[in-house]
Image (cartoon, coloured by chain):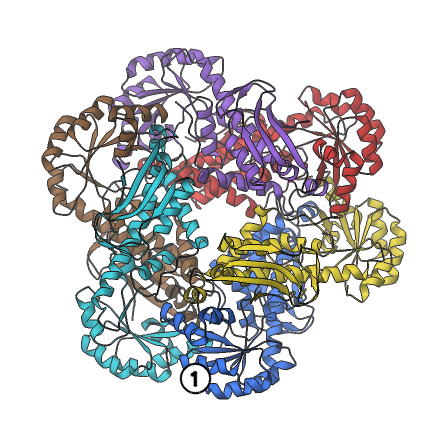
Chain colours: A yellow, B blue, C red, D purple, E brown, F cyan
Amino acid sequence: MPLTPLPNLIVEPIVRQALLEDLGRAGDITTDAVAPPDCMAKTVMAARQEGVVAGLDLAALAFRLIDPAVSFKPVLADGAFVSPGATVATVEGAARGILSAERVALNFVGRLSGIASATAKLAAAVAHTNARIVCTRKTTPLLRSIEKYAVRAGGGANHRFGLDDAALIKDNHIAIAGGVAEAIGRVRANVGHLVKIEVEVDTLAQLEEALGAGVDAVLLDNMSLDDLRRGVNIIRGRAVSEASGRVTLESAPEIAATGVDLISVGWLTHSAPTLDVGLDTMT
Amino acid sequence: MPLTPLPNLIVEPIVRQALLEDLGRAGDITTDAVAPPDCMAKTVMAARQEGVVAGLDLAALAFRLIDPAVSFKPVLADGAFVSPGATVATVEGAARGILSAERVALNFVGRLSGIASATAKLAAAVAHTNARIVCTRKTTPLLRSIEKYAVRAGGGANHRFGLDDAALIKDNHIAIAGGVAEAIGRVRANVGHLVKIEVEVDTLAQLEEALGAGVDAVLLDNMSLDDLRRGVNIIRGRAVSEASGRVTLESAPEIAATGVDLISVGWLTHSAPTLDVGLDTMT
Amino acid sequence: MPLTPLPNLIVEPIVRQALLEDLGRAGDITTDAVAPPDCMAKTVMAARQEGVVAGLDLAALAFRLIDPAVSFKPVLADGAFVSPGATVATVEGAARGILSAERVALNFVGRLSGIASATAKLAAAVAHTNARIVCTRKTTPLLRSIEKYAVRAGGGANHRFGLDDAALIKDNHIAIAGGVAEAIGRVRANVGHLVKIEVEVDTLAQLEEALGAGVDAVLLDNMSLDDLRRGVNIIRGRAVSEASGRVTLESAPEIAATGVDLISVGWLTHSAPTLDVGLDTMT
Amino acid sequence: MPLTPLPNLIVEPIVRQALLEDLGRAGDITTDAVAPPDCMAKTVMAARQEGVVAGLDLAALAFRLIDPAVSFKPVLADGAFVSPGATVATVEGAARGILSAERVALNFVGRLSGIASATAKLAAAVAHTNARIVCTRKTTPLLRSIEKYAVRAGGGANHRFGLDDAALIKDNHIAIAGGVAEAIGRVRANVGHLVKIEVEVDTLAQLEEALGAGVDAVLLDNMSLDDLRRGVNIIRGRAVSEASGRVTLESAPEIAATGVDLISVGWLTHSAPTLDVGLDTMT
Amino acid sequence: MPLTPLPNLIVEPIVRQALLEDLGRAGDITTDAVAPPDCMAKTVMAARQEGVVAGLDLAALAFRLIDPAVSFKPVLADGAFVSPGATVATVEGAARGILSAERVALNFVGRLSGIASATAKLAAAVAHTNARIVCTRKTTPLLRSIEKYAVRAGGGANHRFGLDDAALIKDNHIAIAGGVAEAIGRVRANVGHLVKIEVEVDTLAQLEEALGAGVDAVLLDNMSLDDLRRGVNIIRGRAVSEASGRVTLESAPEIAATGVDLISVGWLTHSAPTLDVGLDTMT
Amino acid sequence: MPLTPLPNLIVEPIVRQALLEDLGRAGDITTDAVAPPDCMAKTVMAARQEGVVAGLDLAALAFRLIDPAVSFKPVLADGAFVSPGATVATVEGAARGILSAERVALNFVGRLSGIASATAKLAAAVAHTNARIVCTRKTTPLLRSIEKYAVRAGGGANHRFGLDDAALIKDNHIAIAGGVAEAIGRVRANVGHLVKIEVEVDTLAQLEEALGAGVDAVLLDNMSLDDLRRGVNIIRGRAVSEASGRVTLESAPEIAATGVDLISVGWLTHSAPTLDVGLDTMT
């Protein structure tokens, strides 16, 4: 299942805006003053930590948008494991272009690789089960497309991308509708035939009601391991089962062992630390 | 030293774009199906963790841009400490508007409060010294203005905002110029009189050279505590001294004790975990 | 099943861009020359044809963006049937604002009402069956959100909104994959759990293969009425059935009578004629 | 009188926005899952109906913006007549790029060719006269430039492009000014010397008044054939004469026979059905 | 002939972008540090030079976009003459908002008033004749709409607004076409009936040729006063006559005395000095 | 000290917007009608006045964005002196592209060269002193980056680029704070360590207070030559000294002779007349 790159049409405006944010009104005044236009540099993008790399297309774009003549050659592909010191890519060309784009390129690679790395660790922790790790809508504002991509790069799967591509009925919706089945009914009556419906349930009673009403997936929120197991038993394949809440590297295998199909983790995108990646000059 | 809010002109486009990212082409199909237009809700934005809150203006905007009639009343101000369970704001109005904007509002508050909280912890750790905590350019792409603001909300100070508002001479620049003094000279000859110059030095010899050439600030990068102490002694107030590298809650007080003026920390903005903040319906 | 308005955040940029397209660089030079600023007008937006009205929010926005003091009062709601001459809304205020925004407002209402009207006619033609009318991705470039909304206003339902919110496997995909089942397998392995999969089949053999592989919906493309009936029999509720191709007001009831769940119609959005709606000055 | 292509600067943002509308946040998930990156395709864009083709530059751009390596070779030029089955262009390259851009490319070509085809039919119907077919401002919001271009591709001519490039005095303006001559006077006093003035008149008396005041063109709105003839006689070349209202393929020759210079038709742009154009894989 | 304000839809994006250009990533750091939020200010916008004021709507917008609570009350209207010291408007509200928007507001008013003032001086110099002063396309990039408005505010008239709203045949076009009449013929065959055609001629022979071919206006470029007089005699009202080249306050009356209808002046928009306008705190 | 070009990322959006402003909705209708697509032209961009050229990158972009096949070859570099008639660049290619982009290209080169030329004259007038000429924030809205660049091209230096990259304490700030020292203290407490602080002083007493409080630069506003001399004596290198107010070609040398470091001049950017540059066809 190879990783498909995001369309350039989606990615380029983000990289462009990030560069403009850094260049400000006057550009890289330090590099412009120090480096003559004909000064060349050979650099290596290298990981300083173990993890999974992601975002190389964005780094390539950052250099290319600053200076189309800079050569960015990826040594690894997004989704590859890296050990500390591993070369990720070589970047060669005018020193001006390389130094001016460096920070933005690394900010993208660091963030996306951080997400991919966290995802990969969790995925490895449940690799012996059928459970998959999925992300949520708790992404960084303006970066949802690329953060969801990073989750895929790390071996995880994606939950819905927004409020509009799938229905997720939560506790507030249930309260407003006056019940699980009523909420499901209202949604089914209003959405198109290609929209899936998932319901977040807090209790096994709600789960039964949801399954009775018919749903594509159920989100078993913050349930004990026992209740998760019972829930999976109740579901018996009638819907996709998703567990969420208090997922850690330690708890993930136990949650996965309950038989749930999916384990969703908000912190993959909102709190995964950056992977330390740097740019080293070759001498 | 009160915290000044960012201009709405800077903040609103970011919030607007974040909402559009979540609404997609069809909007909040779940809430639209479940909640009648006249269904009202009273909710409370509450912290679920200890920390420092930031980003309430962005949350307010998220609700207002979705539904101008929603009332968002902050109970605390950005920069305030919160304990778990503390009410941050009340949000009342049509359930549709509140539920549709909820995730985006929380994504902003969670991220910015996470940065503010991490900054505040570090700031507290060095509060008995003269050292201040500062951030770097390792910010989330497209969010630099608001992340730098969050650092201020947490009691930290800001480093430069981009490549153009101050000169920071790094190892690569020194290598290209052929020496610290030459690099400083090139920069001084090219930048305006309101641009400060900082040099990153790895050795005390470089530090001496930099001070000899005259700079506004020196970045003592990855130096031992002993070298930091020696560096501070050498500087004697001739430049602002900044330490960076391997800063943790544990190491920060020791670094601060060397007498440096500033401790810069990249992970405040690139790796601080989100502060858990939620929206609870009042019953 | 009431119609939910589109979020203003989605609609306003479209209306704003449409007005700027019409105003050009100098604005409404005719009205500015003729009408003094204090000249008031009372006008009525009226249908000149029978149909279903849609797009009143966009008309309201067009007037408001040109002159916030213009009062636009809808008499009918989107989705309402109109007979020729029926008043749709009253528009009162400065003549300048009303005349400058008139054309753009009418262009929106005419187009969206045209789509809603065509949809409503088709929906009425199959109202005695269980079949629903759905649109396609053959929408006017840049107007997909509002055209899909107009279909809902006319009593139809929406197909997917883009390439990313559901998988639709077509003949080319099947040819590339080397078979229906293989194509389905590749898609299922790559998309998230909230993404539905539909397959377009040309033959009953392909239909059997698709159902065997498991899909959410099947698109029976350009099949004879006999084959549609056989297809429905084969499906027996294992998937949503959708018929497409050569749908007209005449053929729709016959197609619906085969028992298909959905009838998809590209010309609702790409070729429905505008509903004639005008703005009349009250005297 | 060859057709000049629109500047790429005008067209590209429209095509880009249309592609982004279709790609959404995740891109073409079906094609990405099914087609390996190295899978090549040879396709032919072919007309399925008789008509006049337009919009090939936009189709070329759609493919190029998705994948610059896709080769789009037009076989016909915009403005050419096509019979059913005629090849319009060949499109070759990676299957991914071709399939992902296909719908957007066809949506543009279908719509613009539909307009060009309708225009060409009307133009042919009056070809034996001196009358020319012109469009109006009743265009699709956001697409005015390209729809006016399609009218030219079909052999029609353009009316004004917006509210600002020519003055068109309508009934409401006349009512506000208190008369035809007064309205004309106010406009002439306010607009630049390169702005033409046209007046819409409902009666021959108004026509006389307009000609007396001096105008560049008169719009004879909804007049009987007899009145049109009388109007033309009255005008005697002192102004361009334009007829509008109830123009059909049947009525157009009769209207043209009255001697008017121009026949303007709103439905060319607001209600012309799409020309059916498809993309066929070559085997 | 009162001055009509530009639509807010056209003006607001320009003012917004100008403010963002000045605020940068961190806003007005000086004012934010010095002025408490509740510090109020009463200020007066006053002319320091004689001239004609223009751009007050843009100034009002600048203050409003920074702080909607600031009260901007124009004392004069655009187009009014001011003597040194004259109060143009009062601006009251929070000191923060006023000081942060001040420079942008003054930059707009200064520039537009400078254009209006230069126009007014020239207009006065020819007021005893029938000649009118008109501007050209030599405007500041991105500011054409508002600079053309400033010319109107100063009592001048506008030439075409761009390459698309009128045809202006220049020497290069004539050379390419092989003659004045041929160039006119090509243009007339290609443009709509509401597009005027002007030809730039260098000699009286070209003028005769142009009039013979029929044009709406002739631009007599860089001709001697004698030739201008002869040209006017030749034209005899068959076309609008426009003189251009070497127009100064001194030469304008002489040029006007030749009987030309229009005198066009590029430096009104590209080289008129700013009118000195300042903001004074009332004590 | 060579001149560094601005990043293309900053410049291209400005040129693109300027071209769209000129092309409008229909493009260059005159050239499109007159020039066949294969008509080639060889032209020369030439100065018609003495001065310093700037903005050639923007001109190159204007031609390239209209027609990538047009060859723009600069003969001189930005910052070079030109005499009347000097060739600045050659521009060859399709006549259509060249004629359609000509005006926008010249508008940029004329304006930026005008600023560079005015700066160069002032710089030459003080070249025998240590004083440098600097610009202000009185720039054309939306063009600050490129106008500040033009000042550098003319041999001047840049003041701050906006409200956020340096603190400039003015009379209003001092009044609000209640004194020079208090204002400085508030600013220093709130801004980062890489932000310089300048204070505008009207009297020598204020100057003493400012120096006592410690600032990076002092702006001696509208002082007599005597006071400037006294001020320089007082400062004795403790801060950068800047003089402003009533700077002309005549007064500049006298001001410079007082020993001030900088002379700031608003009219360089807001009132410098365009340098006359034209495009001539080679025969």
Question: Which chain letter goes with mark 1?
Answer: B
Measured along the vertical axis of the image, is residue D58 above or below residue E2? above
Q: Residue at x 49, y 25 (%)?
A: D77
Where's residue E5, x and y in %?
33, 45
Q: Is residue E8 shown to the viewer in this render?
A: no
Q: In front here: F241 or D94? A: D94
Q: Residue at x 66, y 60 (%)?
A: A113
How many labels, in total?
1
Q: Residue at x 68, y 49 (%)?
A: B31
Q: Please state which amino acid type lies under the numbered disc 1.
A: Arg
Q: Quadrant of the C terminus of chain D?
A: top right
Q: In front here: B125 or E282? A: B125
Q: Is residue E181 shown to the viewer in this render?
A: yes
Mark 1 falls on what kind of element?
A: loop
Read off the residue under disc 1: B238
The part of the image, by quadrant, that contains residue B266 is: bottom right
Crowd tier of the residue under label 1, counting other residues whose Cα lies within 10 Å: few below 14, some 14–19, many 20 or above: some
Where's residue F145, x and y in %?
38, 58
Q: Quadrant of the N terminus of chain D?
A: top left
Residue A201 relative to residue A32: left or right:
right
Q: Residue furthest front?
A: A283
Q: In front here: C150 or B97? A: C150
Where's residue D192, x and y in %?
27, 36
Where's residue B155, x and y in %?
55, 76
Residue D281 relative to residue B65: left or right:
right
